[in-house]
Amino acid sequence: MADSHDIGLIAHLMRRAGFSASREELEMRAAKGYNATVEELLHPEESEPADQNVLLRYQPAALLPGGQPPMGNVNWMFHLVNTKRPLEEKMVLFWHHVFATGNSKIDNYDQMLAQIEMFREKGMGNYRELLVALAKNPAMIFWLDNQENHKRAVNENWGRELLELFSMGQGNYTEKDVREASRAFTGWGIAAKIPRLPYGRFPWEFEYNTEDHDDTEKEFLGHKGNFDGEDIINIVVQQPACHTFICRHLYNFFVADEPQVPSWKIEPPQDPQAMAAMVKSFRESSFEMRAVLRTIFTSDFFKNARFNKIKSPAELVVSTLRLVGGEEIPRPGYGADIAMQPTYMGQDLLNPPSVEGWHTGREWINSGSLMSRINFAAEMVANTNRPGVRFMINRIKARGTISPEQLVDTALDLMGPLEVGEQSRQELLTYAREGGQLHWANAAQAEERVGQMLQLVVATREYQFN
Amino acid sequence: MAKDPVLVVLQLSGGNDYMNTVIPYANSLYWDNRPAVNIPEDKIIALDDKVGFNPSMAPLKKIYDEGKMAVVHGVGYADSPRSHFRSMDIWHTCEPNIVGTEGWLGRALREFDPRKENVVTGVSFGPSMFRAMSLPGVPVACVSGALETYGMLPGIQGEQRAKVLERFKNAYAPAIGLGSVMDYLGTTGIDSLAGADILKSAPQKYSSTVTYPGSKVAQKLRGVAQVHLANLGTRVFYLDHGSFDTHASQLGEHAKLWEEVSGAIEAFFTDLREHNAADNVLMFLFTEFGRRVHDNGSGTDHGAAGAAFVIGDPVQGGQYSEHPSLKAEDLSQGDLVPNVDFRGVYTTILEDWLKLDAKPLVNGTFEKLSFVRN
């Protein structure tokens, strides 16, 4: 039975249910205990949201960022780094991945951010309500062309992806169901857009056009009736395939890497018992995300899943930033230096490659992305002026003169605690031994040595895991 | 000594609209099916009395007229799933029925370099790796961003650098019992360390009078040219451009994409020719599917058969196969039915250009075409 005050377990929870934390915060949470931390994460409304005023003071253009990067990325990165509601923000990333919508087509980060804000509000609530909000979300409507889905000219894009990617998965419906679902969503469009000139962009609004809605009988997944879009969603959320699909996404995101989504209809889940537990609470709570999340974080299958998942680029960047600190204020240059980092590593936030989101797990890693990941993290920990790095250095310094072994073990402990294999530990030791004992007679030199040790720690294979 | 054949693959991601790329303008059914999303007849660049290029493809028409561009009509495979992800997976792995993990070009790279002697045999201009190139144990140098700034742990310099990189190399060395993901990370780390050293040399050696356009695809092709001209032994280059997923407002967007692609290809081949290095390069363009025959009022939905293109000095130009029938009774769920299996196109490239046995690489025997000059 895991100790509920174990800092390793708390660090695991914070990496998965959030974006990691500074050593100081982890120690504070360890003192509070595991279950208390889980409950705090599950109730974001009890903590303050990130302070928009700070964002606006430094990066006013990030409020309505328009069509080009990086200001949209600046806005979201600011929230990711500063949020005191880590699970809420993690769920935003989760839904952004599942309901992947991209600026490549939207060409309007204002609308992308409005969708993100909707995920913030509803992402931990009821899944059925979330789907309804999604169907009315202007960015989603435009992304999947539902404004072009007319009574007399059906456009199947939204209808198909709703079933294939957002709720049930391929193989659980027929081409006819796609057609019928699409018909039910005819007339779900966007109000005519006001031209951008001369006053700039206007917000997009959902508009239900009764005259363009196909007001006749449909037959969908064995049900017959004059369905409207919301009826379709009500039928969809009752499907066992939907429960499995959403829970498998959650498992893949929070617990362990599953195969890529297209193979789910062929390959069974790796942990059927975990899936059963999640599906049970999803169903019994009538699709409350909070209930499933509680089931996950209090389960043994979650607690035992340490360091078995490759960090997504967003996780790698944000967790490193929250560890080292010093990027709470979106200074000039924040866009290219910080906010676009996940993009450089293959995860362009607010602009996934397609409606099917990103390939995850080991597919995040290739010779190019691995180098970007290592180099970014190394640059961050090398800066001994960052408060999180400072904190670690002071901890090491407080121990006085230490052996190379102690240097390695302390660095690994403070950086996670990070569990590394014997091979990595040996190389860190070899490097530490070349410098001999660490003493502080020349503090600048000692700090540089610690900085290099931290760089080598983030360059290990183990640091790539969450 | 004869130069080794080189392949450049340009993936048109998102599903390029075949019917507005190679336009069957003489067929009245084209005009019937495309009341909103059509190209005015006087703008079409005719290839013959049946089909013509999109007006944005003027630079490609020049190459076509020189006899160095093959248009392959009606490419695809049976039972298109009309899903981007799945269809791209099928094109990448040649596995239409199961979810494959081995890329067809990854397999080709293994044939070229079975003992992994050159980690830049395959170079991918990402930022993300393409599944077509991926095969466990086969290194592919994956360049994101500019070649000039490519390298590991650049923050550690001076006498510590060599020591740190040595530790890195050992920490990533293969070991028993770590599991497949750790193994994969290990190989990737070692390979990217080696690849960076080699590729960094390419821009230093490069000079050219050719100015590439500013588009992403042009900048990537410039990187391809730099590496090719540095003679590093690279046999397969891979890059992509998009998104061709034009469900709405198609006309403007599609024209812009083809303008970028055409301009980039023109600059690339001009550059190679200037350096007398075009004769061993064959470029292949494909997309995951064509789009639906009938437009939806402002764009086109996911379809089936598409067009592929093969460009370069080694190419026997012209049109291959024929445009699939537009007649309602010949369509499958409103889509063009493919008449060329994409694996036949791959087989032609693999056997007649790269001189490899294609059967194990594309999972079967498929009819070849004759677009490679003998």
Image (cartoon, rainbow, N blue to C red):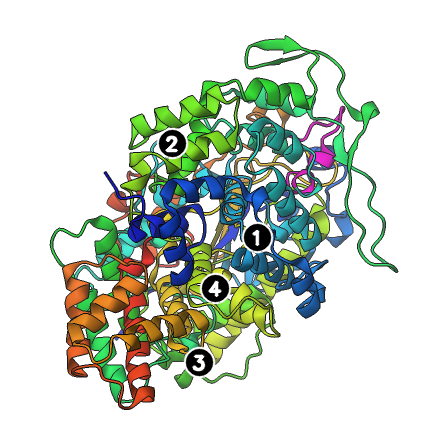
Q: Are marks 1 and 4 on the same chain?
A: yes
- Tell me where residue A267 sits by quadrant: top left
Q: Position of residue B172 (x, y in %)?
A: 21, 64
Q: Residues within 10 Å of mark 1 (few under 14, many from 20)?
A: many
| Image quarter in which the N terminus of chain B is found | bottom left
Q: In this image, B68 relative to B282: left or right?
A: right
Q: Secondary structure at mark 2?
A: loop
Say if the magenta span includes residue A155.
yes
Q: In this image, A149 relative to B114: left or right?
A: right
Say if B135 sits above or below B121 in the image. above
Total numbered circles = 4
Q: Are marks 2 and 3 on the same chain?
A: no
Q: Position of residue B343 (x, y in %)?
A: 37, 42
Q: Which residue is mark 4?
A: A344
Tag 4 and tag 3, C-beta contact below 8 Å: no
Between the C-alphas of marks 2 and 1, the distance is: 24 Å
Kindly identify the amino acid type of the residue bearing the numbered disc 4. Tyr
Q: Position of residue A255 (x, y in %)?
A: 35, 40
Q: Which residue is mark 2?
A: A264
